[in-house]
Image (tube, rainbow, N blue to C red):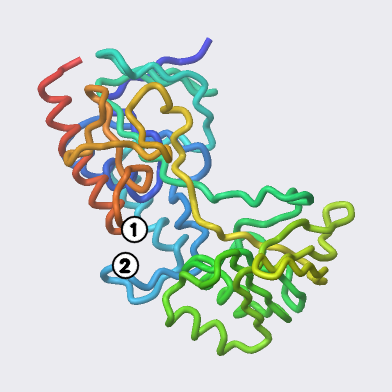
Amino acid sequence: MKETRSFDVLIIGGGIAGMTAAIYLARANVRAVILEKAICGGLCNYTYVVENFPSYPSIHGMDLMQKVREHVDYLGVAVEEVCEIERLDITGREKIIETDEAIYKGTAVIVATGRKPILLDVPGGEAIHYCSVCDGFTYAGKRVLVVGGGNSGFDESLYLMRIGIKHLTLVEVMDRFFAAQSAQDELLKCGDVDARKSTKVLEVLHENGKVQGVVLENVATGERETLEVDGVFVFMGQNPTTEFLKDIVDLDDYGYVLAKEDMSTSIPGVFSAGDLNRKQFRQLTTAMSDGTIAALACERYVRSNPG
């Protein structure tokens, strides 16, 4: 039989928004727990370098998240990592979340599950990588293909070149690149880089999980070619991690949470913070802002609705 654990606030997601909320709640003497399906830090853990975070001109993403995690631990916030949510009952006055480890009860919930990479759905896609920091080192001295002409595609390509990729081909299906011009210029300075617009991947060719090449198509001319590469990395953007909230809180047509200014949702006592919210800009600092606001509003809710 699973143990039942009671808190004031249940935080789903241990990225920068969730951890920021936890810090503010702990300092307000509100008992909170972070429920994280992997390890705290979210997608920032896989960012090679962060250069726009105040106080750190340049820092590895995982190092930055470790510092935030240390702050969370210093304040004594309960954290359950590598857990799967099996049941979610958060529409009533008492909020209940059951994981594979325990049953959690609280007065309020902050959802901070962020976003996840968009997958490339093509034959052979099971051999694709979505994290250059995790898997890039195995391709030093080899040829890789990167899919995605936005900032993440160019930034991750630059990281791959820095760790010794022999040759990199970057493809974007649209007729222009969307990355900042400075990112484009920096990558192209590396040499041994071929950046192509109006190009899509039709198939990843592999044998026993080992990539041998890709079939590409120029969407403007219809011309196809087979390109020999040793690895494929995809950075095509992200979708909100909100499938579990469908039919519970109000979402827009793309799955983003329709949170109010105070991060409250359509369900009383349920707040949403970070990149899963519908908004114009998504940065580490905007996620921190959301987490701060959600925590302050959540504290007020908990005080006025004692369990």
Residue occupying the point 50% across, 56% down: 237
Residues under numbered marks 2 and 1 in contact, where contact means CB atoms less than 8 Å apart: yes
Q: Which residue shows up at 48% across the image and 31% down it?
A: 243
Secondary structure at numbered mark 2: loop
In the visual, does 95 lie left or right of 168?
left
| Numbered badge on residue 68 | none
Q: Quadrant of the C terminus?
A: top left
Give the mark nearer the N terminus: 2 vs 1: 2
Q: Which residue shows up at 65% across the image and 82% down it?
A: 193
Residue 111 in picture, x, y percent from top left: 35, 35
Q: Position of residue 210 (x, y in %)?
A: 84, 58
Circle 2 sits on which residue? 53
Whether residue 217 is situated above or below residue 275 in the rendered picture = below
Count neighbours of disc 1 (C-alpha within 10 A) and say few if under 14, some if 14 to 19, many if 20 or more.
some
Residue 93, image quadrant: top left
Q: Amino acid at mark 2?
A: Phe
Instruction: Kindly state the secondary structure of the residue where label 1 is placed.
Output: helix
- Label count reads 2
Q: Nearer the viewer, residue 164 or 189?
A: 189
Residue at 15% from the left image edge and 17% from the top image edge? 306
Is residue 230 shown left or right of residue 44?
right
Instruction: Relative to 178, say whether 88 is above or below.
Output: above
Label 2 Cα crowd, 10 Å radius (few <14 / some 14-19 / many 20+): few
Q: Is residue 250 above or below residue 120?
A: above
Q: Position of residue 96 (x, y in %)?
A: 37, 17
Residue occupied by mark 1: 284
